[in-house]
Image (tube, helix red, strand yellow):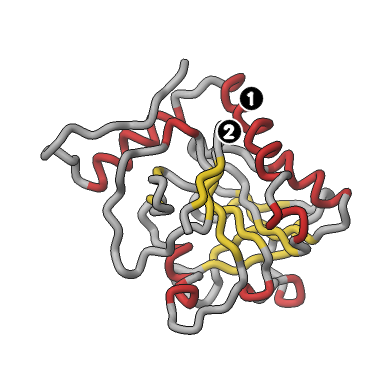
Amino acid sequence: MEFDALELPDNSTPPKQQLRKMLRARRRNLSRHQQKTASMALCRQLSQLPEFIFGRRIAAYIPNDGEIDPQPLLGLAWRLGKSVYLPILHPFAAGRLLFMTHNPEQVLAKNRYGIPEPLCRQTHYCPIWTLDLVLTPLVGFDEAGNRMGMGGGFYDRTFAFLNHHGKPRNPTLVGVAHECQKVEALPSERWDIAMRKIVTERAVYQSR
């Protein structure tokens, strides 16, 4: 099953929640074979990014709800001597994330959303401004770098400092998604964090 970028009818843009539902259904409807093939193609694209080649601290995620799977890239990262981190729900700051060390032998536990994450140990978390590359899951995206997430705002709150005046270089946020999650244009709010690039199994979209 192949999908083209979703094109919305003129003057009939659905509400954000309806669009999110449509795009989530698209990725969930991909077969296991399509998911695996897309994952391998995505990771080949990611492995060629300068941000990955030269980055030392790489943050990724465990896929859920049909998200494209970046995990094959993690094996390469470990072989190259890079440090890998996964997001966890912040235990004290509601609606924010921490990034914890992840290694191949690590036991993960499901959080309240059913997503596996490392156990929270203060000595194992990474200050987010010291990360080099953060692979960010998407529900939808456009070529301008606008990202639609699951609606919880976790990444927007966590990386809000990137929108501030005099923002630091790091980390570089790269959105990852299936090509079928691309739309012509997404509405954006002032608090939304745009992606530097968005990568799918088919293409790399340079947004800024």
Residue 150 in the image: above or below residue 180: below
Task: Please report the residue visible at 15 percent of the width from the left and 36 percent of the height from the top.
Answer: 10
Horizontal side of residue 19 vs 168, given as left or right: left
Q: Residue furthest left?
A: 11
Q: Could you tell me residue 70's position as x and y percent?
A: 65, 42
Task: Please report the residue visible at 72 percent of the width from the left and 54 percent of the height from the top.
Answer: 52
Q: Could you tell me residue 19's position as x and y percent?
A: 28, 40
Residue matched to label 2 = 201
Name the kind of residue labelled 2 in the image.
Glu
- Considering the numbered disc 1 on the image, is that residue within a helix, a strand or a loop? helix
Query: Which mark sits nearer the N-terminus, 1 or 2?
Result: 1
Q: Residue furthest bottom?
A: 166
How many marks on residues?
Answer: 2
Residue contact at pointers 1 and 2, CB within 8 angstroms: yes
Residue matched to label 1 = 37
Q: Could you tell me residue 35's position as x and y percent?
A: 58, 27
- Considering the numbered disc 2 on the image, is that residue within a helix, a strand or a loop? loop
Q: Residues within 10 Å of mark 2 (few under 14, many from 20)?
A: many
